[in-house]
Amino acid sequence: MRIETVAAMLAIAVATASAQPEKPQPVTLVTAQRQTVRQGDPIEVSVSVSNQAPQVVEVDRSATAFDCFEVTDPDGRALPYVGFDGQVAIRLIRVEPSSTIKIADALDLTDKYLFQKAGRYTIRFRGGPAGVSDSRALTIDLTPGQVSEFDQVAASLLPVCPSGWHLAKDRRGEVVPFGRVPAVGFALHLCRNYMQGEAVYLWFTRAEAQIDPDQKPRVKVEYLGRARGLYIYASVDKNTPPLWPTATEDISRALQIGKE
């Protein structure tokens, strides 16, 4: 086949492809339960997807479990993600033509990001992981209030988090330090890759979490002391010391843990 013929066929193929109309991408909308929220209160939003295409589209609802928002503070700085960093199963949901569905309802952004100051915040949903478009920006006004104790502790630890590591809030309520009995409080971890044993786990409890003789934890838990009226426990995972040899010292200093 002559080069001229091949070139002509390629030109026709490109022209045909460019002439094909693009499929409409599902449109994403973020709405807030309240446009004005007091510091320390939940900042709840819902995410809806509208399909105006003539065919059914599938959206991954599980994408809302992770860092799926771009949140900018009153000074124009992006807030760090401090939410869930585990694994979840893909949850595909069908969106019929000319229909709209909610893929997340009453999603509390304070579980994902640290809102440390009053002012106006800009919020945008990043649709790529879910297979939809990014949303338009939504603004929320945060009025002066009291930042939660959990968030105060998390904020104090961010400066000592090594480069390439991140902080993740795990849970509040009843927590269980490895090898100890349950106690009321909250838990978080600092990690580079928790699946590779590169993490430091921290528990903050209202009362002492006693050792459970029936448990055999895979990693040692150390009692660091008390701060803010909380008992603080830490577990340095197996591959962390070479990467962060001063982890417990840095954390104790950041939390201003008193010696007993």
Image (spheres, rainbow, N blue to C red):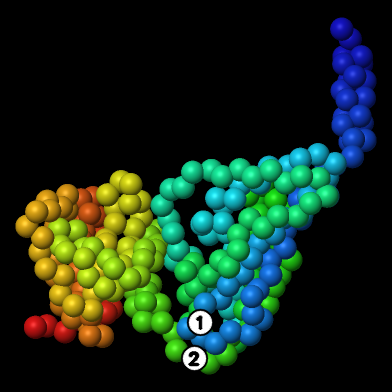
The residue under label 2 is 145
**Label 1 sits on what residue type?**
Asp
**Label 2 sits on what residue type?**
Gly
Position of residue 182 in the picture relative to residue 157 (left or right): left
Residue at the extreme left of the image, as rendered: 213
Residue at 64% x, 80% y is 34
Up/down of 140 relative to 71, above or below? below
Is the Cβ of the residue at disc 1 closer than 8 Å to that at disc 2? yes
Up/down of 172 relative to 238, above or below? below
Q: Is the C terminus in the top left, top right, bottom left or bottom right quadrant? A: bottom left
Residue at 23% x, 74% y is 205
Secondary structure found at label 1: loop
Residue at the extreme bottom of the image, as rendered: 144
Question: Is residue 160 in view from this perspective?
Answer: no
Image coordinates for residue 103, horizontal then vertical, percent: 63, 55
Count of numbered labels shown in the rendering: 2
Q: Work out whether residue 205 or residue 5 is closer to the camera in this orientation and state it.
A: 205
Q: Residues within 10 Å of mark 1 (few under 14, many from 20)?
A: some
Give the number of the disc on residue 211: none
Position of residue 186 in the picture relative to residue 125 (left or right): left
Image coordinates for residue 135, horizontal then vertical, percent: 71, 62
The residue under label 1 is 41
